[in-house]
Image (cartoon, helix red, strand yellow):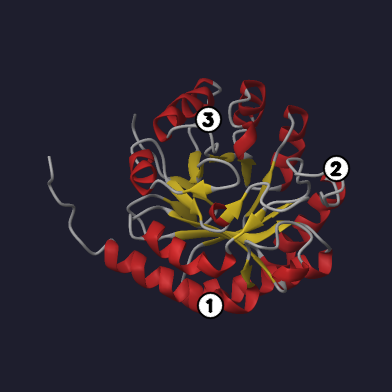
Amino acid sequence: MTVQAVTVGNVRFANEAPFALIGGMNVIESEEIILRVAERFVEVTSELGIPYVFKASFDKANRSSINSFRGPGMDAGLEILQRVKTEFGVPLLTDVHEPHQAAPVAEAVDILQVPAFLARQTDLITAIASTGAAINIKKPQFLAPQEMRHIIQKCREAGNERVILCERGSSFGYNNLVVDMLGMDAMKAFAPVLFDATHALQMPGGRPDSAGGRRQQAAALARSGMAIGIAGLFLETHPNPDEALCVGQCPLPLNALKPYLEQMLAIDQLVKSFAPLQTQ
């Protein structure tokens, strides 16, 4: 399977290239907070020279409880995302949960994201791929890395090879995720690979009404992923994670963004400065 770089605007996703960042918030809580987060990401990535795509979800359909906050919905959410693009000129990414959403969402954003729990849904994959937009596929927690080639093939059959894979951990018993670094490295043979360094901190169902998380280990886990030499990071933040309306135990505090990315940039530059080792 030939690995092709994916270009979105001036952002290039390739495993051998300097790392690119997809970052923002888990879910749109309000226009005010979205613009605040986007502004900080643009400031920091511009200063550090990191290619950047803004991310936020208009709906979080995969929630633990019926009472969990889901977001403003597609129409209102896409309007807020367009405000981000108008003000900051950055590419956008958001989730698509149902086939009928694919076409209208593709008109508003640059990258369509397939949620991890839905990546086996053929009709959804086909609808998203048929838009021609770039696609970020979250690896399901229940699939082995090598199985991702079949999902990529579905996209290719629909005429779309602009596919990125995103690692976010694998189920390890109840209420726990682990990240298989060798598995993430193996996926580089299929597509540009991102590491979702905040969702991988999640403890699914770890609280009575929601997921838990291990935010205190956000830097340690991300450093491990960057050491493999991948296309980039997927990162969610919040100005005050303890007040977040969705999985506040995982996002990076917004005020930690710059030192966090400085570390990741240094690791990426070091790893990609080495010549590949011949180990066969």
* Residue 106 locus on image (x, y percent): 69, 40
Circle 2 residues within 10 Å: few <14, some 14–19, many ≥20: few
Question: What residue is shown at x 59% (from left), y 31% (from top)?
Answer: 119
Q: Amino acid at mark 1?
A: Lys
* Disc 3 to disc 2, C-alpha distance: 35 Å
Q: Secondary structure at mark 3?
A: loop
Q: Amino acid at mark 2?
A: Ile
Mark 1 and mark 2 lie on one chain; the one further toward the N terminus is 2
178 left or right, relative to 55? left
* Disc 1 to disc 2, C-alpha distance: 35 Å
Q: Secondary structure at mark 2?
A: loop
Task: Using the image, determine if residue 68 lies above or below residue 85.
Answer: above
Cβ atoms at labels 1 and 2 below 8 Å apart: no
Q: Which mark identifies residue 168? A: none
Is residue 210 in view from this perspective?
Answer: yes
- Of residue 166 and residue 74, the one placed in the foreground of this image is 166
Q: Which mark identifies residue 258? A: 1
Give the residue pinned by disc 2.
66
Between tags 1 and 2, which lies in front?
2
* Residue 10 locus on image (x, y percent): 51, 57
